[in-house]
Image (cartoon, helix red, strand yellow):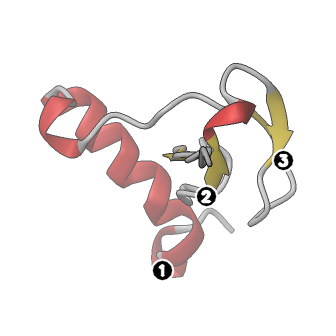
Amino acid sequence: MRYIVSQVITVNCSACGGQPEFDDSEAGREAMCPLCREPLVVTPAKPAGELSAEEQMAQYEESLKETDWGHQPC
């Protein structure tokens, strides 16, 4: 008997900053982020160690948009 083992891909959503997970069979396809319902392409997220300093800062600033209400424009 053979078992098919699927892997999970963690994706960085640029709209909400979340990291939803998808089955690897979804790789390369467009899907809806289950957290914010915005469309995204299922591509593996880079581990933080592989991101440049600029990419890490951009990711951090994007995540602040949803949580740091003290710095939101009026």
Are the residues flagged by discs 1 and 2 in contact, CB closer than 8 Å?
no
Image: 16 above or below 46: below
Give residue 53's position: percent from left, percent from top: 14, 32
**Residue found at x 46% / y 59%:** 63
Residue, far front? 1
Q: Amino acid type of disc 2?
A: Pro
Give residue 69's position: percent from left, percent from top: 54, 79
For disc 1, the marked residue is 70
The mark found on residue 18 in the picture is: none
| Horizontal relation, residue 33 to residue 56: left or right | right
Q: Nearer the viewer, mark 1 or mark 2?
A: 2
Q: Nearer the viewer, residue 64 or 52?
A: 52
Give residue 49's position: percent from left, percent from top: 12, 39
**Residue found at x 38% / y 45%:** 59
| Horizontal relation, residue 21 to residue 54: left or right | right
For disc 2, the marked residue is 20
The mark found on residue 38 in the picture is: 3
Secondary element type, mark 3: loop
Specify few, some or many for label 2: CA neighbours under 10 Å numbering under 14, 14-19, or 20 or more: some
Q: Which circle's residue, 3 or 2, is located before the other in the chain?
A: 2
Q: Amino acid type of disc 3?
A: Glu
Real-space CA distance between mark 3 and mark 2, rounded to the nearest whole angstrom: 12 Å
Secondary element type, mark 2: loop
Image: 50 above or below 13: above
**Residue found at x 56% / y 60%:** 18
Q: Which circle's residue, 1 or 2, is located before the other in the chain?
A: 2
